[in-house]
Image (cartoon, rainbow, N blue to C red):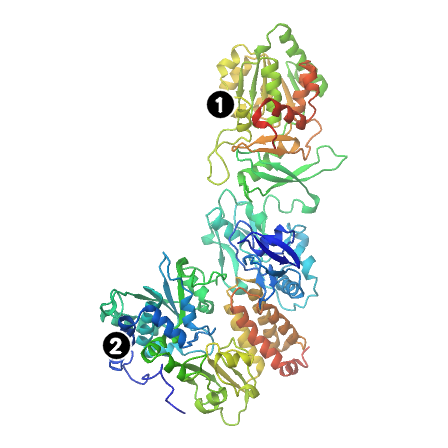
Amino acid sequence: MTMDARILTKGFELEHLRRIGTYIDQGGYRAVKKALTEWKPEQVLEEVKKASLRGRGGAGFPAGVKWSFVPQKTDKPKYLCVNADEGEPGTFKDRYILSHNPHLLIEGIVIASYAVGIHLAYVYIRGEYELIARRLEEAIAEAAAKSLLGKKILGTAFGLDVFVHRGAGAYICGEETGLLESLEGKRGNPRLKPPFPASVGLFQSPTVINNVETLANIPLIVLNGAAWFLAQGLPKDGGTRIFSVSGAVNRPGIYELPLGTSLRSIIFEHAGGLKPGRTLKAVIPGGMSSPVLLPDEIDLKMDCDSVAAAGSMLGSAGIIVIDDGTPILDVLAKVAKFYAHESCGQCTPCRLGTSWIHKIVKRMAAGKGRAEDVDTLIRLSANIKGRTLCPLGDAAAMPVLAIARKFKGELERAMKGNA
Amino acid sequence: MVKIFIDEKPVEAAEGLTIFKAAQNSGVAIPHFCYHPAFVPEGSCRLCLVEIEGSPKLELSCSTVVREGMKISTQSPTVREARRGVLEFLLAEHPLDCPICDKAGECKLQDFYQDYGLTESVFREFKEKREKKVRIGDKLILDRERCVLCTRCVRFLAEITKTSELGLFERGIRSEIGLYENEPVRNGYSGNLVDLCPVGAITDAEFRFRTRPWFLAKGESICPLCSRGCNIFIDYHPGFSRVPGSAKVYRIRPRTNEAVNGHWICDHGRYGFVEWQQKNRSEKLVWNSGNGTTQMSWSKVMIAIAERIKALRERKQSGRISIVLTTWLTNEELFLIKKIFKDGLGVKHLFFADPPPGTADGLLLRADRTPNRRGAQEMGFEPKPPDFAELSKDTEILFIFGPHLAGSAGDRAWKSALEKIPVKILVTSHLNELASAADFVLPAAFIAEKSGTLTNEDGRIQRIEAIARACADVRPEAQILLDLAREIHLDDAYFKALSGPGSIFRALGKDIRFFEAKP
């Protein structure tokens, strides 16, 4: 196990890193000073673009490109929304950044806002992260007290206010437009796109929505340059990723590793491999929404493009390891229940499809399944995928499709003998 | 304009138009639940998905704007499969209680299933149980099992009436339409929710279980209950040929006219119309002589009335005929009255008795609750209320059109005035106290039973058609007036040429420029 790769989680072992004093002692807030006093906003944007920083939330969209979609000239205010809703099952990386090093995020928020011309940022944080939200608010107060937030940051003309908004527990509010609706005080139903948030977002104004980990990378890019950042990862996918590894491994937890690290090494070297006597059955590589991979598919570079080429997705880099002790029907039951529960109900295929799938899987789990149910699951998932208003439909359909296809034999065998 | 291809057919479409509208304009219908031309696209039903060449996924036709050279398929196997999939999802949880559903026969879910579904059911699970008769308004009943959650009702109340009584509650499969704090839908436009609902989820308490849509014929007409002149459909049962008066109007629905009423009508018109159509109708020809009440035939009545007029004319006293009109009358009828009474007989006292004004609601309903005041004004009438003192001074014969005189002033004023007039002829579609005060009561047609035109507040001349004939004795006022003109031999050549509303309107156009070459 190499510790060299850590750039985001560096210093997490320090007891008071979340305090601004320790953070500054460790070299913190130099990036804000550099960006605000030495660089023009366009230069920041250009550097982030060059760094090939892809979104860490799940979609993997290049952050710099996203920022550049925001109109330069507008008579409306612009907003930054930090997506700290971290709801994807199997993902628990943002909470570590928020709780261990909130100032790194705040620094990222200030620089991103400076680059895009934003003076008001919201952190939409998962409702369950109560303590973390409080810590973040403390950190924001600390930063404001040191003129790192508020009017005339570090004596420059640039000003920014940051507010923390706690969610109320819906997975759908992690979807960017659902998040906006929720932040506006409405029911968290996703919006029809286009228009995209970059032009019509929060309160009908141009809005950037970035994941916590994405923004935490910004100070590092500003301090060390795009070339350095690219060297930490891959040419089209710069930097590191914080992998959340859970399930049937000896050492579950977060692992910050260069993009392109192989899935096999993450499971068997970093996370300590499986329990004695167990064999690998399946791996969910990028949060529960990503299609499962079989044991013969894990010699795979973990970066957006490679995982996509293998028919899955890097998503939120939440790796769930499943060994032969878990019946695949149990996995399917969890997946089906989750999405049926979290579907917002707005569009037909997701509302009725996820619940139908859940009903079938529940019946299968109760020992009343029929062999043809597996085909029905495949057909129904295919009718959800690509046909819904927001990505939740795909997120619900893809894992079911993959499990039903890749484990059809096991599922049908389990149905045998049922009346 | 951009050139696009819809199902391989080249089509010109205006820039900024959605695929849905471009297709509609070229005669291609795309199935949909949530889309409605009056609302911002919602994109939630997922039924209007189409295939666009070069696009990896199916796209929403209701919100995607056309681009030059776009190749759209509305019938490709993928599109049909997607529609089939959506319908399968909806039907899986649908109660399938079509046999007792009021919407059956005009239900979009039924129609689309016929076009795209027709699948064998593979749904083996338990359907969700939901409430089936939630009273959400005075006349509105919500069936949550039938609801497809298109949210048209929610958006109508949010975007059009801006009252937002309904909202979306719960989520996922438990999502449902509901009231906030049980405050019912209470605005003057609630009936539109029934028309808007593509399925039988919101039904009308007035229409519920009364008939089946396929028994009803529909006629185009104009709502007479205010000066807006909203375009309507009258849905009526044509009746049975051997049963006189068996035709029946069941409901009124808005007929889209962007220039007048958009897609809506108000409840005052919707429910008021059916009530006027059905209740207190004047159906019999009655003569209240000193010896009691006798029923008469039209020919005898016309002769009796004509004799009285002729007697006055011989004495050169035809100016002692007075008239109380109503702007419920059509342009044609008002014109005949002008020709016969004003120009022909030289009537001096001409008043109007109309329904009292109400309050305008800022949307469609106007304070002026009459359908043709503008027409009367354009014809040179001054729609002034009756001056009873003047009226009773030297009037020998009084013609009263419509029932509104009874409600127009204090009871005593009209009653005592009428007592002083020897002959009172009431031509009315509805009975009230006035009928017992008149000597002759002539049953006239209500709006659905006669043809002609009405002029709305904007000066828009709109046609009404005789649709349902209520009763054998009922005659349109135009016919009564023409018969009277012939009976008293008033300019025979002129009136002989006038046979129906069409010829009367042409004559009206010749006389008064305003009515020329319209509608």
Mark 2: secondary structure: helix
For residue B409, the mark is: 1
The image quadrant of residue B232 is top right
| Residue B199 appears in view | no
Q: Which amino acid type is shown beneath numbered disc 2?
A: Ile
Residue B49: image location, x then y, percent: 60, 61
Is A369 rendered above or below residue B223? Answer: below
Find disc 2 in the rendering and name its residue: A20
**Direction bottom: furthest residue:** A277
Is B364 rendered above or below residue B491? Answer: below
Question: Which chain contains the residue that carries disc 1?
Answer: B
The image quadrant of residue A241 is bottom left
Residue drawn where x is 51% and y is 81% of the image: A306
Residue A94: image location, x then y, percent: 39, 76
Mark 1: secondary structure: loop
Do the dots labelled 2 and 1 sit on one chain?
no
| Quarter of the figure that contains the N terminus of chain A | bottom left
